[in-house]
Image: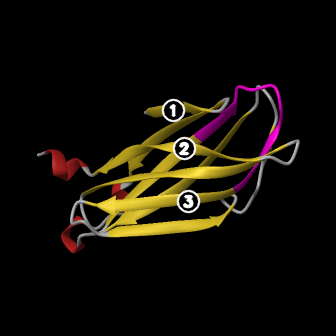
Amino acid sequence: MQKTETRDFSIKVNVVYVSQESKPDQNYHFFAYKISITNNGSSPAQLMSRFWLITDSHGHKEEVRGPGVVGVQPKIQPGQTFEYESACPLHASTGSMKGHYQFVAENGESFTVEIPEFYLIAPIALH
């Protein structure tokens, strides 16, 4: 599990290789991840957008941008944790993801919360 703290927010990431969705003989590896976003501050903030940089071990890079996460733009209250699950397919047995969330505070101020780089490693890559 990876963890980072930025501007009163902590981000935790847990990654799982999904073997039943993967086809290693076709260079297709499927990873699921769960992200927990905790507001450790004293004011609510709304997650407005996300940015991901996905890199595989072949050097292929993909940028993903969009509103909110999994179709929502959650307002996270002080002391509250918002969790969601998503997935990432790769055409390599290893890779990494990193990025950031764009938030808007209650007073209208926009700020960025970094997502720590985490690694996508298929079990076959470890042998």
Disc 1 from disc 2: Cα separation: 8 Å
Q: Earlier in the sequence, mark 3 or mark 2?
A: 3
Q: Quadrant of the N terminus?
A: top left
Report whether 50 appears left or right of 53: right
Residue interval drawn in magenta? 36-48
Q: Earlier in the sequence, mark 3 or mark 1?
A: 1
Magenta highlight on residue 85: no
| Furthest residue in direction right, as rendered | 107
Report whether 92 appears left or right of 12: left
Disc 3 from disc 2: Cα separation: 10 Å
Q: Residue 20's x, y, as percent?
A: 37, 59
Q: Earlier in the sequence, mark 1 or mark 2?
A: 1
Residue where numbered disc 2 is placed? 114
State the image quarter where residue 118 is shown.
Answer: top left
Task: Identify whether 31 is placed above or below 12.
Answer: below
Which amino acid, mark 2?
A: Glu
Q: Residue 111's x, y, as percent?
A: 69, 46
Mark 1 residue element: strand
Q: Residue 97's x, y, as percent?
A: 41, 53
Report whether 3 appears left or right of 55: right
Q: Residues within 10 Å of mark 2 (few under 14, many from 20)?
A: some
Residue at the image position 63 percent from the left and 67 percent from the top: 66
Which amino acid, mark 1?
A: Thr
Residue at the image position 76 percent from the left and 31 percent from the top: 80
Magenta highlight on residue 47: yes
Q: Residue 74's x, y, as percent?
A: 77, 49
| Furthest residue in direction front, as rendered | 109
Task: Identify whether 112 is placed above or below 56.
Answer: above
Main SS, magenta region, reads: strand
Cβ atoms at labels 1 and 2 below 8 Å apart: yes
Residue where numbered disc 1 is placed? 4
Mark 3 residue element: strand
